[in-house]
Image (tube, helix red, strand yellow):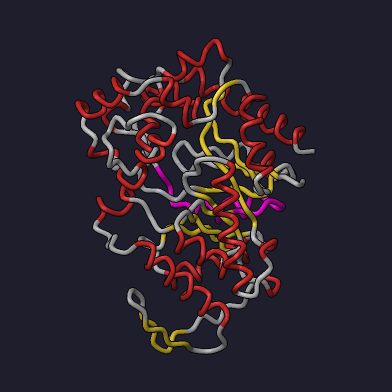
Amino acid sequence: MTVQLGAFLRTTLPLGLDNLADYDSGRYHSLWLPDHFVSFWPDSIWTPEFTDLAVASPSPHRHLDALAVAGTVAALTKNTPISTLVVDTVRRHPVMLAQTALTLSHLSKGRFILGLGSGEVENVAPYGFDFRKPVGRMIEAVKVIKLLWESEGPVDFHGEFFQLEHARLDTEPYGGKFPPIYMAAGGPRTLKLLGQLGDGWFPGAIRSPEHYAEQLGIIHQAAKEAGRDPQAITPIFMCPAFIGDEAELDELLAAPLVKSYVLQIDAENLRSVGYEHPMGPGWKGIHDLDPAKLTRDVVIDMLAKTTPEMLKAWVPHGPPEKVAAYYKQYADAGARVIKILDYGGMAGMKYAARSAQRTREAEDALLKMCA
């Protein structure tokens, strides 16, 4: 099988562009830039009382604009494709996304990938964006983007969310090719949309390799029904891991920020591995997570109820070789680009300082397994 690695570039301050030469070396399939206003870590425990990371950075929410950063990365690299992970279609109008994606494609000489998603509460609700029917909005936005790219001359569009009257976008695509569109998809509607119109798949919460293969099958079937080649769609797998030696895992998993990763897990998914969610049976994971609203009392109660065993049941963990073996299962299930994302660095400065090296060791082990 052919498996390539994905790379991740933080868009928070301090912005780390020092590793761009490595990211552009040919080792990575693509470089992904998150697009957020805020991160997933609760404000109430981002303090020196709970983590020494708060000494290094006063806030976990110092995000820069991912599309602006993409322009800088395009100018500083020559080889590796650059993708947003992901821009949501709630905060960004599809007309602007269509134009910006073409702009970045020209700046990068055809290397820009438009990564799209339907949005998350933390990035939209506090700012007054309309978050009704986010999936329907995303479906319509993709159609608008494609319409503007592929039409000659002015177009009209009358949808539920977007209206175009004699609208045009005459900028030609770089090299005659429009930017690929990768989508964050996990439900039936978005998986079908991806099969019909998308070029790459950022999966949502995946319970098992079998679950991954099942969802990939839905995408492939939709592609066939649309007269497309299913193999032209790039299947990606990524999920957080806790990389650490067995002897230190208990210390790592006891760190408050690491334990708070449970907030990103859906209660139903946690129940599927035998645990009740500390936030209650209706907790929707990332879709319910607004870090500014999680008070100190709520978070402390959550920390008290979260055990290392609970985290181990859902999140891959252990030394680099063991973590690599976990991701290898998803390569066997059909993933062709894999990102190993070490959340063990959230255990504190000691772990953060070595996180990049441990991740690279896991990447090397995975590539060897898939050679």
**Within the magenta stretch, is there residue 167?**
no
Q: Between 356 and 303, which is closer to the camera in this rendering? A: 303
Q: Between 3 and 268, which is closer to the camera in this rendering? A: 268
Image-quadrant location for residue 328: top right
**Within the magenta stretch, is there residue 75?**
yes
Residue at position x 67%, y 24% from top? 321
Q: Quadrant of the C terminus?
A: top right
Q: How far from the left and from the top, in percent, is residue 168?
A: 48, 84
In this view, 53 is above or below 250: below
Q: Between 218 and 66, which is closer to the camera in this rendering? A: 218
Residue span colored magenta: 63-82
Residue lying at the far right in this picture: please name it: 371
Residue at position x 47%, y 18% from top? 252
Residue at position x 33%, y 74% from top? 161
In this view, 293 is above or below 227: above
Q: How far from the left and from the top, in percent, is residue 277?
A: 32, 32
Left or right: where 209 falls relative to 131: right
Left or right: where 136 falls relative to 235: left
Left or right: where 313 falls relative to 32: left
Q: How far from the left and from the top, in percent, is residue 110?
A: 67, 63
Q: How far from the left and from the top, in percent, is residue 237?
A: 59, 45
In this view, 195 is above or below 351: below
Q: Between 182 and 27, which is closer to the camera in this rendering? A: 182
In this figure, what is the number of numbered marks?
0
Residue lying at the far top in this picture: please name it: 247
